[in-house]
Image (cartoon, helix red, strand yellow):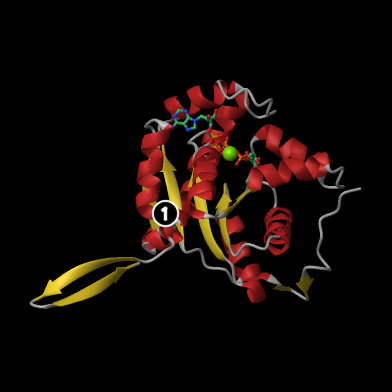
């Protein structure tokens, strides 16, 4: 029987994450904007661990957890699961990983998600990657996704768009007011979107760029080697 772990991971109200202090990037955008697709590329290229809040909730349903039925109903309706549940799942996944840098995809989804995560974990995201895409394109993509998701039908898609506009955009606006949002035009083909994503990540995150590169600069008879990284 799957359970949502708490006692092992928290001491009183304080999250064990305040000790681990992972580097976190929130990946936000409308349903079908390409968050999961681009996260897979970022993992490959920059060595982050990808945590999709939606995937963690679906796994919780499949584990037979006592919250499973409630989560299943909320996903089918496109509504947002209470933050205590989603945050516990994220917390557990981060603590079980040996990595220290994470892409948190599809979270925070509303102000309650955001404020609770901040107060429970004390984590401040490095930045927010926001995939901006038209509803027409997102709808087209979801309807041809074919992954058997219960919420990939036109009725639930419309509800998810409404929730995104009414609840999730305010989170993006909040972080934008703090200068933390990196907006990406996500309406382009996958490879082009990834080019824009790559430009956002610091070169020191680049796995193919980990060795310092030196190039010579000549000053008269002296040659200095300038290190780039
Ligand atoms: N730039 C793109 N151009 C065309 N199709 C794309 C692009 N990015 C992703 N897709 C496709 O669109 C569908 C949705 O992409 P993805 O699952 O990555 O979106 P998402 O933002 O994670 O959606 P959700 O919020 O519903 O989980 C997938 O079938 C994916 O292959
Ligand atoms: N923070 C979150 C994230 C997701 N949900 C629920 O899961 C559904 C699917 O999410 P995807 O990111 O995989 O599209 C979403 O519609 C919500 O019902 C959530 O409650 N809280
Ligand atoms: Mg996704």
Question: Looking at the image, which residue is at 37% across and 53% down?
Answer: 200
Q: Can you tell me whether the CB of the residue at mark 1 lies under 8 Å from the nearest atom of ligand 2?
A: no
Does residue 100 appear to the left or right of 180 in the view shown?
right
Count the marks: how many?
1
Circle 1 residue = 173
The quadrant where residue 133 appears: top left
Q: Position of residue 86 (x, y in %)?
A: 69, 53
Residue visible at 92% across and 48% down?
1
Between 166 and 81, the residue placed more toward the observer is 81
Mark 1 surroundings: few (<14), some (14-19) or many (≥20) residues within 10 A: few
Q: Nearer the viewer, residue 217 or 141?
A: 217
The vertical placement of 56 against 144, above or below, is: below
Q: Which of the pair 160/203 is nearer the observer?
A: 203
- Dividing the image into 4 quarters, which one contains the C terminus? bottom left
The quarter holding residue 36 reads top right
Location of residue 62 in the rendering, given as x and y in whole percent from the top left corner: 81, 39
Q: Quadrant of residue 146?
A: top right
Farthest-out residue, left:
220
């Amino acid at each position: 029987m799957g359970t949502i772990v708490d006692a092992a991971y928290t001491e009183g109200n304080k999250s064990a994450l305040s000790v681990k202090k992972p580097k976190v990037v929130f990946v936000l955008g409308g349903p079908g904007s390409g968050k999961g697709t681009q996260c897979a590329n970022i993992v490959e290229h920059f060595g982050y661990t990808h945590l999709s809040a939606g995937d963690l909730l679906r796994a919780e349903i499949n584990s037979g957890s006592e919250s499973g039925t409630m989560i299943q109903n909320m996903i089918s309706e496109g509504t947002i699961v209470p933050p205590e549940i989603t945050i516990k799942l994220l917390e557990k996944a981060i603590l079980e990983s040996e990595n220290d840098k994470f892409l948190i995809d599809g979270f925070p989804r509303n102000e309650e998600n955001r404020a609770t995560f901040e107060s429970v974990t004390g984590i401040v995201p490095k930045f927010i990657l926001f995939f901006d895409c038209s509803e027409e394109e997102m709808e087209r993509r979801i309807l041809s996704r074919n992954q058997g998701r219960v919420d990939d039908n036109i009725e639930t898609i419309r509800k998810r768009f409404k929730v995104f506009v009414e609840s999730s955009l305010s989170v993006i606006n909040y972080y934008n007011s703090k200068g933390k949002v990196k907006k990406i035009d996500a309406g382009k083909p996958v490879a082009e979107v990834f080019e824009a994503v790559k430009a956002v990540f610091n070169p020191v995150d680049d796995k193919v760029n980990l060795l310092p590169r030196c190039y010579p600069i000549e000053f008269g008879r002296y040659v200095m080697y300038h290190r780039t990284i």
